[in-house]
Image (cartoon, rainbow, N blue to C red):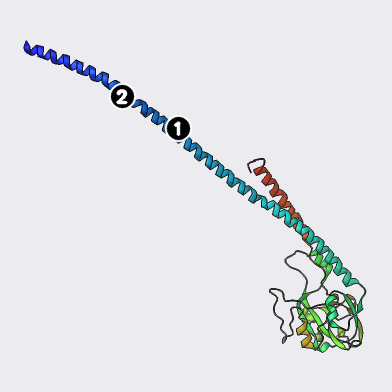
Amino acid sequence: MSSFRLMLTLCSYSRRIIRINTQTLIPTRTFFNRPQKNLLKHEQVKFATKHQQFKSTVVQKEQSEDSIIKWILLLIPITTFGLGTWQVKRRQWKLKLIQDLHMLTTADPVPLPADPAELNDLEYRRVKVRGRFDHSRELYILPRSLVDPEREAREAGRLSSSAESGANVITPFHCTDLGFTILVNRGYVPKNKIRPETRTKGQVMDEVDLVGVVRLTEQRKPFVPQNNVEANRWHYRDLEAMAKATNAEEILIDAVLESTIPGGPIGGQTRVTLRNEHMQYIITWYGLCAVTSYMWYAKFIKRLAL
């Protein structure tokens, strides 16, 4: 019996201990759970705040980059507008230059000045001289094509020309009234007529009155070959070298078309037809300005998807 009582006593104590522990653990668990939930909410709020700040920073950076791109792209219509306006001024200048050259080359001729220095202000001016040609010292500028203003106007802008290649004949001309020798570009001859013996009929021997257009020396352009004095092959007007080769003054005139005689070179080889394609450039630049202006407006002002 004593053993049975002892077991009952132990069971009673065990129940009390379990009850006490249970009552003790419940508040303890509650005490520790509340701060953890608060901490979790705090971390969530903190993360959301940082995310919002990051998102705001990214948006501000994108807006700043869009603003920079916006003003950079605005330079395109501004630049094309400026180029179009510049071409308008260039066209006005070109038209005036063509008109001035036409007036100079069609004005009444004046006597050739006795002082060669005065010719510097007379380029493209018509002058008149009297004298004789010295055909034994001809020079040839080549290759050259026949100057035909109507044909050049038709073929303006083409990459190639159908004109036959030949040469311009430069002949010393002794001015009897001035007492010195000048150079005269008598005009164009085709390839098969470059040699003097092929055009003996056109070799004038008598004293003649001649009208020509004053031309000054020219600088060699890129890709133009050097003049070959020994071979008598000239590619550009180097008056100093030409005068030295013919014992003439550094004066050259282009004989007018009216000087042409049967069998001789064709006069009127002064090239005064200037290419005037500025209207095409004006349309191109202003057209680009209009298109890019609309695209900029639609993209950055109306916010349309292009």
Classify residue 258 as left or right of residue 162: right
Pick whichever, 150 or 85, lies toward us.
85
Q: Is disc 1 in contact with disc 2, using a CB cutoff of under 8 Å?
A: no
Circle 2 — which element? helix
Residue corresponding to mark 1: 45
- Which quarter shows the N terminus? top left
Can residue 82 be spotted in the picture? yes
Where residue 151 sits, quadrant-wise, is bottom right
Image coords of residue 157 (percent x, y): 75, 64
Residue corresponding to mark 2: 29
| Residue 26, placed above or below residue 39 | above
Report the amino acid beneath label 1: Val
Q: CA distance from mark 1 to mark 2?
A: 25 Å
Pick whichever, 66 or 187, lies toward us.
66
Sooner in the amino-acid sequence: mark 1 or mark 2: 2
Image coords of residue 58 (percent x, y): 53, 42
Where residue 103 sits, quadrant-wise, is bottom right
Pick whichever, 113 or 11, lies toward us.
11
| Residue 285, placed above or below residue 154 | above
Image coords of residue 271 (percent x, y): 81, 72
Which residue, as the protein is rendered here, is positioned at the far top? 1
Q: Which mark is residue 97?
A: none
Circle 1 — which element? helix
| Residue 96, placed above or below residue 170 | above
Q: Residue at x 84, y 82 (%)?
A: 116
Report the amino acid beneath label 2: Arg
Can residue 265 be spotted in the picture? no
Q: Residue at x 76, y 77 (%)?
A: 218
Image coords of residue 302 (percent x, y): 67, 40
Classify residue 51 as left or right of residue 180: left
